[in-house]
Image (tube, grey):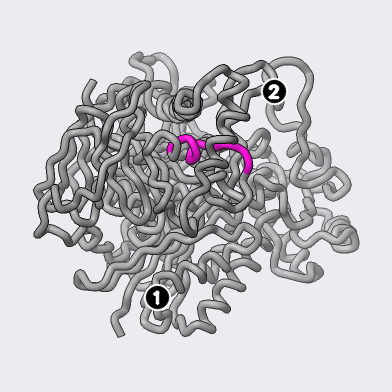
């Protein structure tokens, strides 16, 4: 038995797999179409494509879009809410925002309709003191009404439960005596922070997707067991860590953004191995473009993500900015007569026109094909040659004729508009946050990322690109490199001048204990457990938070003050000594370290041939408005000392990399393509 490790990531268009044997043994990759109706079918198809013997696999890690898709498509379980009397409409009132910035138009549908939101008498004050005891009989009646209304899951969300959860705990205890299943969510158990709106929405998201995720994982675990798999399936969380699938549904909300997080974790692991500290991660697949930052080898994490309007999800997640711009993004001329690309996508079915599965509207992938960047005879997942005539006809009909452009000019315009949207996403995570893109390396991956990265780097003056050995399955690699991780956040909301430091230390110790107990409960082998500690702080009277790293259970008030002042100065370039600092929340990440994946095993093995031998052919490729005769190379045959000057096309099973004219290319020891970008 070789005890292989397997990572499987389900994307919007493709399901990716990487299989690695220990000690530098066999490495296999697979890329198959995603099956949106039942992601487990694509998962099992990827295993079959790679010839994985499940009985010999020691570990399978899975990145899934099940919960994210369920929320975006509103394919959720019927959920009921029980809350404090007088606060039935908190989830609908929200903050002083509106769906559209101008006018009074726009609609919003809350996750729980008003007729399924019930109030009961109970009340805690902001210090956790009981003002009104819990009316237990009213609670029982509300639970019975929600069952009669056909609710599958239940949320209990009381005011100030972050400070004193006694009423929520008792309510859950009573509800479990009556509720027909285990799908009961207590708000404080998911998010023990102040702000009842964000806490309530996060808990409601959890309850709404819990049955969806549970059913999916149970089905997948059953299929894996039938195939001979005898170990636990791990699931990627949005925080960049893994969790046992046996308990993942308990905090299902934490698997939102699982897929994008896995790619960032793979990028961080690759960067650390390559000796690079600061990265912009650029993951473009068939449906979306995900951009994040890695600083000092560590991905940025946020606890303030809004998946869509009025859906804030306040659990720690890898900070990824997502836009609807991928290879399948549809290009069209809008009502104003302007070319628009995305966010609508052709997805996996029917996909771009060139896939030959019935797609009829031009996409970014179709434009890349017309510009010579893709080979019509070797498109992944396409049987035979791509239908070039259908692609040409659609681009001219939908784009060229309305705008008065020729075929190549129309295709180039699609790429330019798509690139502009992608560059905007990079600006959002760099310039908009005070970071200079020139200080970073652009790490391009995903099936379409390396085709666009060179143009984006030139646009943003990023000096260097890094394209990993297997860019199209980087998210799957992230699944096998991710450690177990559990995050805990508790609100104190106390000025430092009045802070009970012993109480703060006790919270950190309790968080550590809970994390260690959860990892022990998972039963997954780890090489060690590390704890990272953070404080969310602000000046008194401010709204937004700054997160600073702290030493841990021995933290001192002076350390908190100094860390916050330094972070504020770095972020805003101003000092405000006259305003008091407030410790809002304490956050601990408990990380169970797993054995790292041997990334060097992904490097190409064809080191005995020359660059000339790796060259397959050449073809005209369009750059800057004209065609260049461009050599095409097979990446797996490039020697370790390969050095190229663009233009060039580098092809491999899972991805095509476009090298612009005059850019220099070399390989590093991990098999990454290092591209020096000319101005």
From the top left corner, tell me how far across and down residue 6 is, in percent.
38, 68
Q: Which residue is pictured at 46% across the width and 45% down the height?
A: 285
Residue that appears at 22% across and 48% down: 672
Looking at the picture, tell me which residue is in the foreground, 146 or 78: 78
**Residue on which disc 1 sits:** 51
Can residue 428 be seen at all in this image of the molecule?
A: no
Residue 398 makes an appearance in the image: yes
- Choose mark 2 or mark 1, whichever is in front: 1
Tell me the element at label 2.
loop
Quadrant of the rendered image containing residue 645: top left
Residue 211 among magenta residues:
no
Q: Is residue 3 above or below residue 405?
A: below
Count of number-bearing discs: 2
Relative to 156, is 511 on the left or the right?
left
Residue 19 position within the rendered picture, expressed as x and y whole percent measured from the top left:
34, 68
Alpha carbon of mark 2 to alpha carbon of mark 1: how far?
A: 49 Å
Judge left or right: residue 163 versus residue 612. Answer: right
Along the line of sight, which residue is nearer the eye, 437 or 345? Answer: 345
Q: Earlier in the sequence, mark 2 or mark 1?
A: 1
Query: Could you say which quadrant of the image residue 170 lies in?
Result: bottom right
Residue on which the image places disc 2 = 100
């Amino acid at each position: 038995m070789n005890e292989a490790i397997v990572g499987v990531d389900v994307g919007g268009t493709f399901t990716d797999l990487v299989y690695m044997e220990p000690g530098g043994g066999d490495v296999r990759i697979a890329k198959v179409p995603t099956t949106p109706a039942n992601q487990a079918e694509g998962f099992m198809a990827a295993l079959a494509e790679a010839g994985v013997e499940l009985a010999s696999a020691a570990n399978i890690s899975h990145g899934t879009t099940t919960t994210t898709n369920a929320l975006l498509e509103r394919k959720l379980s019927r959920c009921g809410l029980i809350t404090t009397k007088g606060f039935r409409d908190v989830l609908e009132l929200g903050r002083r925002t509106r769906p559209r910035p101008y006018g009074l138009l726009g609609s919003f549908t809350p996750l729980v309709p008003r007729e399924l939101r019930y109030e009961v008498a109970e009340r805690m004050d902001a210090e956790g003191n009981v003002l009104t005891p819990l009316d237990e009989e009213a609670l029982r009646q509300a639970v019975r009404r929600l069952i009669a209304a056909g609710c599958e899951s239940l949320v209990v969300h009381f005011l100030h439960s972050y400070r004193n959860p006694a009423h929520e705990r008792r309510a859950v205890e009573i509800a479990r005596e009556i509720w027909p299943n285990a799908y009961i969510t207590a708000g404080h158990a998911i998010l023990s922070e102040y702000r009842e709106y964000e806490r309530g929405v996060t808990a409601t998201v959890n309850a709404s997707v819990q049955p969806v995720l549970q059913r999916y994982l149970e089905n997948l675990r059953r299929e894996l067991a039938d195939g001979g798999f005898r170990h636990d399936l791990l699931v990627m969380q949005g925080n960049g860590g893994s969790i046992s699938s046996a308990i993942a549904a308990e905090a299902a909300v934490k698997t939102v953004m699982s897929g994008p997080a896995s790619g960032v974790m793979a990028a961080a692991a690759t960067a650390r191995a390559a000796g690079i500290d600061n990265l912009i991660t650029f993951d473009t697949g068939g449906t979306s473009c995900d951009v994040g930052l890695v600083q000092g080898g560590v991905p940025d994490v946020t606890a303030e993500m809004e998946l869509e309007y009025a859906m804030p999800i306040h659990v720690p997640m890898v900070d990824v900015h997502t836009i609807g711009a991928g290879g399948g993004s549809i290009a069209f001329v809008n009502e104003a007569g302007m070319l628009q690309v995305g966010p609508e996508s052709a997805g996996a079915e029917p996909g771009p026109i060139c896939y030959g599965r019935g797609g009829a509207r031009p996409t970014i992938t179709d434009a890349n094909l017309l510009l010579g960047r893709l080979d019509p005879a070797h498109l992944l997942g396409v049987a035979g040659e791509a239908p070039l005539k259908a692609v040409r006809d659609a681009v001219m009909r939908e784009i060229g004729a309305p705008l008065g452009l020729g075929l190549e000019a129309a295709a180039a315009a699609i790429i330019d508009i798509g690139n502009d949207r992608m560059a905007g996403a990079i600006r959002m995570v760099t310039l908009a946050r005070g970071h200079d893109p020139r200080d970073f390396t652009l790490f391009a991956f995903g099936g379409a990322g390396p085709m666009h990265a060179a143009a984006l780097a030139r646009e943003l003056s990023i000096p260097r690109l890094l394209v990993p050995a297997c860019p199209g399955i980087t998210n799957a690699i992230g699944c096998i490199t991710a450690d177990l991780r559990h995050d805990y956040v508790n609100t104190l909301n106390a000025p430092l001048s009045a802070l009970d430091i012993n109480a703060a230390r006790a919270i950190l110790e309790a968080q550590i204990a809970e994390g260690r107990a959860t990892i022990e409960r998972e039963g997954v082998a780890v090489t060690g457990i590390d704890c990272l500690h953070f404080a969310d702080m602000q000046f008194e009277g401010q709204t937004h938070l700054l997160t600073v790293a702290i030493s841990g259970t021995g933290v001192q008030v002076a350390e908190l003050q100094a860390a916050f002042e330094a972070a504020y100065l770095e972020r805003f370039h101003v000092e405000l000594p006259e305003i008091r600092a407030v410790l809002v929340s304490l956050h601990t990440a408990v990380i169970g370290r797993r054995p790292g994946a041997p990334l060097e095993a992904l490097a190409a093995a064809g080191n005995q041939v020359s660059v000339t031998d790796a060259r397959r052919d050449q073809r005209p490729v369009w750059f800057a408005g004209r065609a260049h005769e461009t050599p095409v190379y097979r990446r797996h045959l490039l020697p370790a000392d390969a050095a190229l000057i663009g233009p060039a096309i580098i092809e491999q099973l899972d991805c095509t990399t476009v090298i612009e004219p005059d850019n220099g290319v070399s390989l590093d020891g991990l098999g990454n393509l290092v591209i020096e970008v000319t101005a």
